[in-house]
Amino acid sequence: MIQLSDEFLKQRRLETLVENQTSFTMNNAAMHVFETHEQASSVLLQFEQPVLASMIQGKKIMHLRDYERFDFLPGESLVLPANERMCIDFPEAMSKNPTRCLAMAIFEDKINKVLQFMNENMPKDNKEEWGLMDYNFHFVNDRGIFQIIQRLLFLFSEDHPSKDYFVDNMLRELIIRILQTNERKIYSNATLSLKKESRLTEVIRYIRNNVHKPLSIDELSKMACMSPSHFYRLFKTELGVSPVEFINNERIKLAVGLLQDPNRSIKGVYLDCGFESRSYFNRVFKNRQHIAPKEYQDKIQKAKFLD
């Protein structure tokens, strides 16, 4: 979970109980930390630049174009186009437990420079260009994005003569990772809707349909009609994760579902998910879920019992 430093909390001024704003502006972006200390509803917010919003603490209920209302929680982020209006409810905010959110407006000149870099150095397999999203994108932060946001929060509030350069480098990585995360979602939807057909779409569909079986890079690269090295490089460039990481993510999603059943043994679960080693399964599961498989299964059953 993103953390605000004690130094930040001491320095900021609390002037209003709803969406109190603390802002920092750099050459290519502006960061705003919003705090709400009482329940509120239908609060409107809009930025002139594309914005990344990341929840820090508490809960918001978001009302956005093309989305059903949804809970916005710590560990999640939103990317919104310029001038996109948000309507926000704060059902749980209170003085002892304020709702906090970070909003980073990234100037379009910076985004366009990163897109140019990606199109020149990271071209897509289907020849489409990387471009600026013109729609709202809600996602769960992966470890890389979380660490960048936390680092940027520190850099924006740091008193350092070179911080514009530090921020600029972090922004480029953040934009690339977000676009790759969005690309994974596009490919994920394509495997269900049969749109955006490409060699990678077919491979991803095959992985999802056969995640319980042994899968190798050689096998997948042949399916994509590429050499193993080219396949690996292209997969990671477009999706932001290696083929093995993608396969393991799909297997852990399956494992999370199977572990809901108290009668399932851990051995049965990891074998049904395509893992050959319990120790490797435990390590991958804990790395992604931050809890061991058996502990997760017990936790789920305890929660059901309490309900």
Image (cartoon, helix red, strand yellow):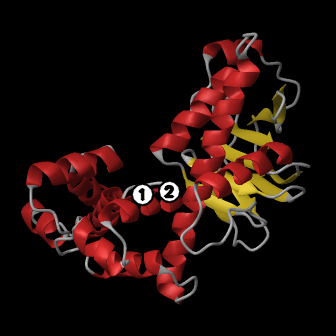
In the image, residue 31 above or below residue 246: above
At 27% from the left edge and 46% from the top edge, which residue is drawn? 286
- Residue 269 vs residue 145, the one in the foreground: 145
> What residue sits 31% from the left and 82% below the top?
209
Q: Quadrant of the C terminus?
A: bottom left
For image coordinates 42% across by 57% down, the residue present is: 233
Work out how far the residue at label 2 is from the one at label 1, CA to CA, in angstroms.
6 Å
* Crowd class of label 1 (few under 14; some 14 to 19; many from 20; radius 10 Å): some
Mark 2–mark 1 CB contact (< 8 Å): yes
Helix or strand or loop: what does disc 1 sit on? helix
The x, y position of residue 7, in whole percent, is 66, 12
Asked whether the viewer can see residue 92, the reply is yes
How crowded pointer 2 is (Cα within 10 Å; few <14, some 14-19, many 20+) is rated as: many
* Placement of 212 over or under 13, stated as above or below: below
Image coordinates of residue 97 in percent, x first then y, are 63, 33
Position of 142 compared to 242: left or right?
right
* Label at residue 237: 2
Looking at the picture, which amino acid does disc 1 mark? Arg
In this view, the residue in front, 302 or 125, is 125
- Residue at the far bottom in the pictured view: 194
Residue 217 figure quarter: bottom left
Q: Which residue is mark 1?
A: 233
On residue 7, the disc is none
User: Can residue 1 be seen in the rendering of this structure?
Assistant: no
**Residue at the spot 21% in from the left edge and 46% down from the top edge:** 283
The image shows residue 195 at horizontal and vertical percentages of 57, 86
Amino acid type for the residue under numbered disc 2: Thr
